[in-house]
Amino acid sequence: MSYYLKRIGQSVVVFFVTVTATFALYRMLPFGPVEMMRVNLMNQLVQQGSPTPQQVEKINRMVEAYTGINPDKPWYVAYYEYLHDIVLYQDFGVSIVKREPVFDILFEAMPWSLFISIYGLALGTTVSLLLGAAMAYTEGSRFDTGMTIFSILNTTIPYYIVAIVALIVFSFNLGWFPSGGRMTQGTTPGFNYPFIAGIVEHAALPILSSFVAGFGGALAFRGNCIREMGKGYIRLARLRGISQGRIAIRYVGRNALLPVYTSIMMGIASLFGSSIILETIFNYPAMGFVTFEALMDRDYPLIMGSFVFFTSLTLLGILVADLTYGIIDPRVKGGAERESY
């Protein structure tokens, strides 16, 4: 139980430290959003003469209306009020450009990002583990050599290059998949074939690119399996007459998965960061695309809200993976007192 409490406590601390540092930088950096808008408005008034105190006060109110930040308040007071509104009212402010609540914009876009990111990562990880195990059990064969070369090539090509090539080939040249959007125009949202088929068509290429990004673990899993298969306890298990299937799954696969599991956790951490690039390439309007548009429009409340969402989802994914690590390796829960299971 102390292991779980420790991990949950660490995640909460990391969340608050990250959000606090970001908010402080957001407010204190030279020529931040408040200063930039205030200087622009002041310059407009200077051309008409020296601004009066009433005009300065009016500028401050305009800055607050546009950015959601009161220039007269210290950053720590504004930070307390920002967290207070988020925790109690789920109020992330109002988007400067869209003029809609930030929470509604992000909550509407989030399921689409989860859809393409999780399917891509799950498919890529599953296939890479199966291929890694098959390569280990056929070590030295043509299949092993061919898949090893393919895996090395795959790890050297960035996923966004794959995304651009897939877009050019399958969308622009062949016309098999749409080049943008997330559903077919004119379909009725719901559990019906045209709507679901449209969603799958629009998500196919982003998922393919995420699949390639999560495919790099095959070579590492092959090496771990070969190392485990050469150990003495595997030979002893065979002498005891344990079936090959049980040895492969319970002994070799489980122990070989431990080092790879760490890279899977890191994959979850980078899941939403990579979605900004993928969704922009495929013009897929989800969280990453919304965040990129907010950056281009300097929509600071939406940028800050996106950052809080990304941080929360990433930490939640890492926490879930971290808590389930004990299922694969029970020594983690028992600390140094347990050397085996």
Image: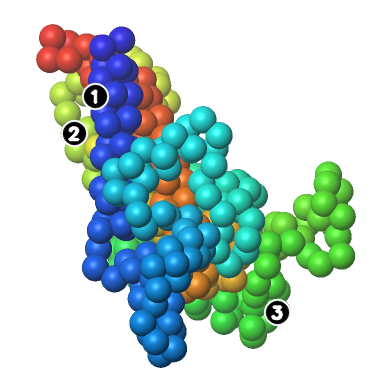
Query: Which residue is under mark 3?
Result: 175
Say what amino acid the circle numbered 1 marks.
Answer: Ile
Residue at left offset 38%, top offset 25%: 324
Front residue of 194/108: it is 108
- Quadrant containing the N terminus in the rendered view: top left
Asked whether the viewer can see residue 283, the reply is yes
Element under disc 1: helix
Q: Is 250 positioned to the left or the right of 176 in the image? A: left
User: Quick check: marks 1 and 2 in contact, CB under 8 Å?
Assistant: yes
Residue at left offset 30%, top offset 17%: 5
Query: Which residue is under mark 1?
Result: 234
**Distance between the Cα atoms at labels 2 and 3?**
49 Å
- Mark 1 or mark 3, which is nearer the start of the sequence? 3
Say what amino acid the circle numbered 2 marks.
Answer: Gly
User: Quick check: marks 2 and 3 in contact, CB under 8 Å?
Assistant: no
Element under disc 2: loop
Q: Is 136 positioned to the left or the right of 97 in the image? A: left
